[in-house]
Image: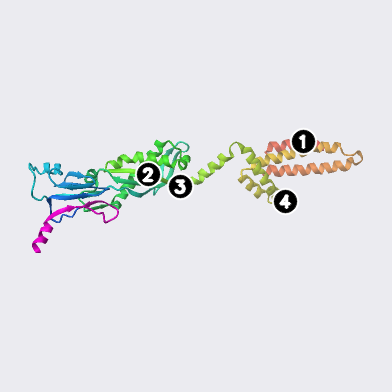
Amino acid sequence: MGLMNFIKKQFIDILQWTEDEQGTLAWRFPMAEMEIQNGASLTVRESQMAVFVNEGTVADVFGPGTYKLTTQTLPVLTYLKNWDKLFESPFKSDVYFFSTRQQLDQRWGTQQPITIRDKDFGAVRLRAFGNFAYRIADPKRFHTEVSGTRELYSVADLEGQLRGLMLQHISDAVAQSGIPFLDLAANQIEFARQLQVATAPDFAKIGLQLEAVTLQNVSLPDELQKILDQKIGMGMIGQNMGQFMQYQTAQAIPKLAEGVGQGGASGVAGDAMGLGAGLAMGQVLAQQLQTSLAGAPQALAAAPAGSAAGNTAASAEDIMALLEKLGDLRTKGILTDEEFASKKAELLKKLG
């Protein structure tokens, strides 16, 4: 029994990997000072590849299938060991298994906003996130460039590096897609495709194939989003700015009238100007004054002769009241000095 245990520890007849641990990319077969028996069986399952490494040099690579290990099935290793005839004794070599399954739902995203060039805004800082999928396509390159002699190399060991590769190509993807920021949300598939095209060569350099990229969201920082909302609002107004100003003025005039009655016109007028209606409101009031002044002579001419003296006195009081209102409007800055002087001269002529 002791001799049999010794023999089992010394020679390996079957090499295989059942991928017991999830998320493993590369796994080294445990040799533990054992040697591989001549004619041993190598089983490589679907979604796997196996690599033989001799004294630090990658020798033979095997895809899915079952192999009997001989000099015919290990040509590179045979050459490296200078076996000029069929070897009959066991041999020592490191064997690594690699998972070639797609590694799905790998997340990428911008921790900080990234500045990119944009057709509409010149430059914007955006945030974006999504996911991607990849697989090992060249296990020899992956072994020499990434996993090396480690006993186990996992998806988690690689995710930071791959996320960085994705992020560094976002600007390239936006430039190559030619899609303005405002249209990115509606063209997520094209943006994701361009990001995959831009990033795939860097994945290939370490033996990986970038299978898919998705973009789930793209947005601006909060402060830039507010500015964009304002720009969109102005764009919606478009050519109807005059109508928009008339609407704002109509909303503000009742507040102004209420404020005049309560002696608070100054504060309300300030609020109206804050709404962007100050200038238009002044124009409306001036037009109303002109209409009133133009109607004053007609009212005097139509008055009966018997009440001329009383009407004259009433007209004089009306004109004085109008002068006071004009003075208030000038004080509030709604009328200029020139406009006030012109209206004042017209009123004084009527008194004469």
Say what amino acid the circle numbered 1 marks: Glu
Please name which of the two marks, 1 or 4, marks the residue nearer to the observer: 4
Q: Residue furthest bottom?
A: 1
Which disc is residue 36 wearing? none
Depth order, front residue of 29/118: 29
Please name which of the two marks, 3 or 4, marks the residue nearer to the observer: 3
Q: Quadrant of the rendered structure where residue 71 is?
A: top left
Q: Cα distance, mark 3 to mark 4?
A: 46 Å
Q: Please name the residue that numbered disc 3 is placed on.
A: 221
Say what amino acid the circle numbered 3 marks: Pro
Q: Residue 151: x and y, percent?
A: 21, 53
Q: Earlier in the sequence, mark 2 or mark 1?
A: 2
Q: Residues within 10 Å of mark 2 (few under 14, many from 20)?
A: many
Q: Is residue 191 visible?
A: yes
Which disc is residue 261 wearing? 4
Q: Please name the residue that numbered disc 1 is placed on.
A: 346
Q: Cα distance, mark 2 to mark 3?
A: 23 Å
Task: Please indicate whether residue 40 sits to the left or right of residue 268 in the image.
Answer: left
Reply yes or no: does residue 4 show up in magenta: yes
Q: Residue 333: x and y, percent?
A: 66, 42
Label 4 SS: helix
